[in-house]
Image (cartoon, rainbow, N blue to C red):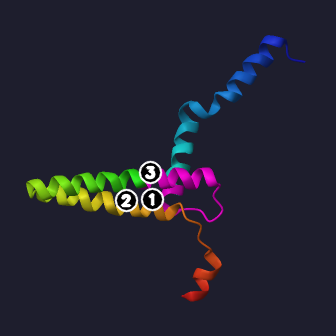
């Protein structure tokens, strides 16, 4: 049987597991995969997070478009297009897609 301090230390280690190195990399990889590919069964919180990120990138695209129209810089137009494309991709990953109906259509 473990003593009281040992069980407390084990409990702390289990709770801190998601915020130390190897697990943070795994969690970040899972978030990136969700944002890029989407998930038809994602919870509402994850969908809202994808929408917030998508709207942020769309807003960045609008700001870069404003800068591009004022400065006529090619780099600003590229940043604008990148912001719009990333924002649309992230917004689309936040919507539920039925994979069965998509595979029948093709």
Q: Earlier in the sequence, mark 3 or mark 2?
A: 3
Read off the magenta span.
34-54
Secondary structure, mark 1, is helix
* Figure check: 94 above or below 63: below
Q: Is residue 102 left or right of residue 67?
A: right
Point out the residue furthest to the left here.
72
**Which residue is depicted at the point 78% across and 15% down?**
6
Magenta region, mostly helix, strand or loop?
A: helix
Kindly identify which numbered label has been placed on residue 53. 3
**Which residue is depicted at the point 61% across and 87% down?**
104
Point out the residue furthest to the bottom here.
105
Q: Is residue 32 left or right of residue 101?
A: left
Disc 3 to disc 2, how far (Cα)?
A: 9 Å
Q: Position of residue 54 (x, y in %)?
A: 43, 55
* Figure check: 67 above or below 85: above
Q: Which of the image's four quarters has the C terminus?
A: bottom right
**Which residue is depicted at the point 36% across and 53% down?**
57
Q: Is residue 36 magenta?
A: yes
Disc 2 to disc 1, how far (Cα)?
A: 6 Å
Q: Is residue 104 magenta?
A: no
Q: Residue beneath label 1, please?
A: 90
Q: Residue beneath label 2, please?
A: 86
Kindly indicate the quadrant of the structure image that contains residue 11. top right
Are the two marked residues, 1 and 3, in contact with CB atoms closer than 8 angstroms? yes
Are the two marked residues, 2 and 1, in contact with CB atoms closer than 8 angstroms? yes
């Amino acid at each position: 049987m473990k003593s009281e301090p040992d069980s407390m230390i084990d409990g702390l280690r289990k709770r801190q597991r998601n915020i130390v190195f190897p697990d943070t990399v795994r969690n970040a990889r899972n978030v990136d995969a969700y944002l890029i590919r989407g998930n038809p069964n994602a919870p509402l919180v994850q969908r809202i997070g994808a929408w917030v990120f998508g709207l942020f990138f769309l807003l960045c695209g609008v700001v870069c478009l404003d800068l591009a129209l004022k400065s006529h810089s090619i780099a600003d137009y590229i940043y604008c297009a990148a912001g719009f494309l990333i924002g649309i991709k992230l917004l689309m990953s936040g919507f539920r897609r039925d994979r069965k109906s998509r595979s029948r259509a093709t």
